[in-house]
Amino acid sequence: MTLQGASTTTAASTSLLGKVYDGATPADTIWTTQTASGACKLLIPHVPFCETPCGSSKACVADNTCQAYPTSRSVGTVRVRGVKTQDGSADFSMSPVANNYQPPAGTALAFPPFSEGDAVTLDAVGAYYPAFTLIGKGIKPLELASETWKLSTGAPFTVQWTAATTTLATVHVKLDVSHHGGSKGKIECDGPDAGSLEIAEPLITQLLALGVAGYPSIIVSRESVSSVVGPPGRIELAVASVVEKPVEITGLTSCTKNEDCDGGKTCQSDLTCK
């Protein structure tokens, strides 16, 4: 379940989507830690090469090694309690459609759909897998302390937000300044919901040295996770509040067309003026 903060073009919203798989989903990009400091790590991507293509049903997870994608399974009707809808109800059921679970047509979720600490309960009646119950906790929508975030070589970077009043959740930070040009690296941090987290200067300097692309952003999420263990393994209920904001970098002008650039520069394929 995701609480998505408002942007300049969209209102705040709540979404609920679920799937139960018979195994873990393989990753086709391997992220390795180049530098770590405190709660943060600078990660570098490696895309494995498989001489024989894996096809659409498998992923290349290591050089010349393919791994099959898992299959989604039905767990029958899922009753949801503790999540408010816009009509004031806090009790509805989701039926699987191609093994996807989401609120039924015509059911719009409120924002926020609960108060901090409220119980959120999902009861699955069972089908391919037997019945189970997930009990999570509601979280407070995340509010960042600023609308403007600036990165500079040679300086640390501090993320600030309004801290929660409980210890139910952790905060995850993802800083990717090159994703529109093919990501060259990213910084990820996981820390307590204490209202502030500093990314050390060496990590920022190294990330910027890898290269930047247009429209860099920072994504900050507050997340509470509960789980049960069943026949397919670990089944999780993740309740998250996510906010994404643009990042300003000295010397970088982002663009979508040549008219966005000045000084004789043109808009490049990575959405930067050069």
Image (cartoon, rainbow, N blue to C red):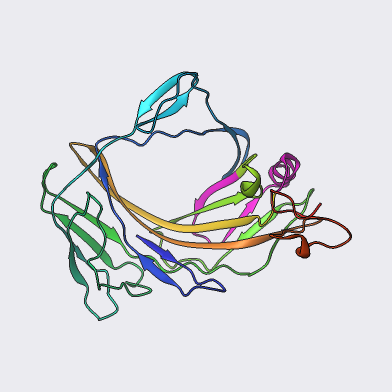
Q: Mark yes or no: residue 10 visible.
A: yes
Range of magenta residues: 187-212
Give how far across and how far down residue 87 sits, in percent.
25, 81
Give how far across and how far down residue 243 sits, in percent.
52, 63
Q: Quadrant of the N terminus?
A: bottom left
State yes or no: residue 191 in magenta.
Answer: yes
Give how far across and how far down residue 85 sits, in percent.
27, 75
Give how far across and how far down residue 67 sits, in percent.
37, 26
- In the image, taking residue 266 as reference, residue 156 lies left or right, namely left
State yes or no: residue 209 in magenta.
Answer: yes
Nearer to the camera, 157 or 233? 233
Nearer to the camera, 73 or 34? 73
Residue lying farthest to the right in this orientation: 263
- In the image, taking residue 269 as reference, residue 40 lies left or right, namely left
- In the image, taking residue 95 as reference, residue 47 lies left or right, namely right
Q: Residue shown at 61%/51% (left/top)? A: 175
Total residue callouts? 0
Q: Residue shown at 48%/23% (left/top)? A: 62
Nearer to the camera, 99 or 170? 99
Q: Residue shown at 78%/49% (left/top)? A: 153
Residue 42: quarter of image: top right
Whether 89 is drawn above or below 93: the answer is: below
Residue 222: quarter of image: bottom left
Whether 83 is drawn above or below 273: the answer is: below
Residue 245: quarter of image: bottom right
- In the image, taking residue 25 as reference, residue 198 lies left or right, namely right
Residue lying farthest to the bottom in this orientation: 87
Q: Mark yes or no: residue 38 visible.
A: no
